[in-house]
Image: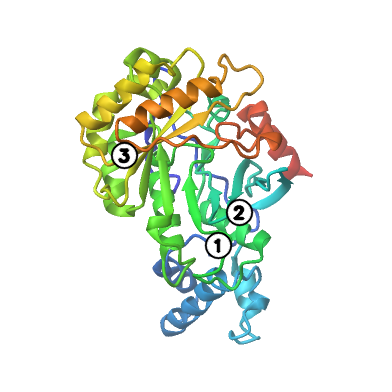
Amino acid sequence: MSADTPLMPIAGHVDPVPAGRAPAPDVDGKVNLVGLSKEGLREALLAGGMADKQAKLRGKQIWHWIYNRGATSFEDMTDIAKAQRPWLEERFTIRRPQVVEAQVSSDGTRKWLLRTHDSHDFEMVFIPDADRGTLCVSSQVGCTLNCRFCHTGTMRLVRNLEPYEIVGQVMLARDALGEWPSRPDGRLLTNIVMMGMGEPLYNFDNVKQALKIVMDGDGLGLSKRRITLSTSGVVPMMERCGEEIGVNLAVSLHAVTKDVRDEIVPLNKKYGIEELLTACAAYPCANNARRITFEYVMLKDKNDSDEDARELVRLLKEYDLPAKVNLIPFNPWEGSAYECSSPERIRSFSDIVFEGGISAPVRTPRGRDIDAACGQLKTAAEKKSRAERDREAAAQDAG
């Protein structure tokens, strides 16, 4: 996003607030080639002074090295003339986000604390299962939606993540899992969910550009059927998501009445349940083979009654939605106003939805011991104000 790009209004607790400002430019002035489209990469080489015919050839070679071989240096690119590699190194970089800390849960879940080039922290999580490995990817530093049950939602929005910072998360996970060269079969990382920090549809252009690289057969080569984007209900962007990205859709529903959803998902005050479900019914990629996932966190005495379960079934059938429901036991965090529903209450809720003909499995919490479970992602970044971060950056530059 350039400095001149208008910022999309975002629904905050009550009033819209602007998305975070554009990131600071690279200190070294180099152009990062990670996250650029194929044409964008070629244009960057042209702008750097490379001849057109050569830029087309070198662009294909560099693309292959970045996304198929996992190269982190131009020196690794052995089919590029040795004399040309210093020229590339002087003008360009192939940087991913910095890994600050890596943690492994007792259940095998991995969480990484990552840092942007302008010193903002965010997180990603890898969840291994017997038949798949899912990477939970962030789209923003912080969040602005203020969902009251979500620890991440208590963070301030700092800024949108750039395409290289989004696709870079996938590349870092492959680094850690030893999955280079990129291959379509036999890999541990099989699925991606855009369910980390932030609301992906409030960073639509950058998320789209990053996921196009992830889905490109010459790029990271992951099928759109293995990618799910989760939204809290940014209704105006949902149709574009289906048409322009084409991935699976997950919706953070979490309540079936206006009063309760207004409380726990404040975006509901702007786009209500009926409007949201109408947009779901029109989602271009939804069908019985690619059902919409409705995420529903189980909160004691708030949204977990048998009546709530029956109303959920009624709503999904009224809008004739190809749907499944993920019931998520609430993951507690210090200062939260909510408690998790009892196992018996969750089981009763699930049984009612199943009896209504809709799949409603209960998600097993993963990574709780390292705060990597659903709704727990939160870094130390939100403890500092923007002014404090600016002062620290200025002091670092002066040093």
Label 2 crowd bin: few (<14), some (14–19), many (20+), radius 10 Å: few
Q: Earlier in the sequence, mark 3 or mark 1?
A: 1
Decide if residue 33 is on the left or right side of residue 107.
left
Q: Nearer the viewer, residue 178 or 153?
A: 178
- Residue 203, image x, y percentages: 42, 42
Q: Residue at x 30, y 53 (%)?
A: 244
Q: What is the CA distance from the residue labelled 3 to the residue labelled 1?
A: 43 Å
As helix, strand or loop, the secondary structure at mark 2 comes to loop
Q: Residue at x 53, y 69 (%)?
A: 67
Decide if residue 391 is on the left or right side of residue 197.
right
Q: Which residue is mark 2?
A: 26
Q: Residue at x 43, y 80 (%)?
A: 56
Q: What is the CA distance from the residue labelled 2 to the residue labelled 3?
A: 44 Å
Q: Amino acid at mark 3?
A: Ala
Q: What is the CA distance from the residue labelled 2 to the residue labelled 1?
A: 8 Å
Q: Is there a contact, CB below 8 Å, between mark 2 and mark 1? A: yes
Q: Which residue is mark 3?
A: 323
In this rendering, the label closer to the viewer, 3 or 1: 3
Label 1 crowd bin: few (<14), some (14–19), many (20+), radius 10 Å: some
- Residue 348, image x, y percentages: 44, 23
Label 3 crowd bin: few (<14), some (14–19), many (20+), radius 10 Å: many
As helix, strand or loop, the secondary structure at mark 3 comes to strand
Q: Earlier in the sequence, mark 2 or mark 3?
A: 2
Its colouring scheme is rainbow
The answer to whether one can see residue 181 in this image is: yes
Q: Amino acid at mark 1?
A: Val
Q: Amino acid at mark 2?
A: Asp
- Residue 43, image x, y percentages: 43, 69
The answer to whether one can see residue 233 in this image is: no
Q: Nearer the viewer, residue 69 or 18?
A: 69
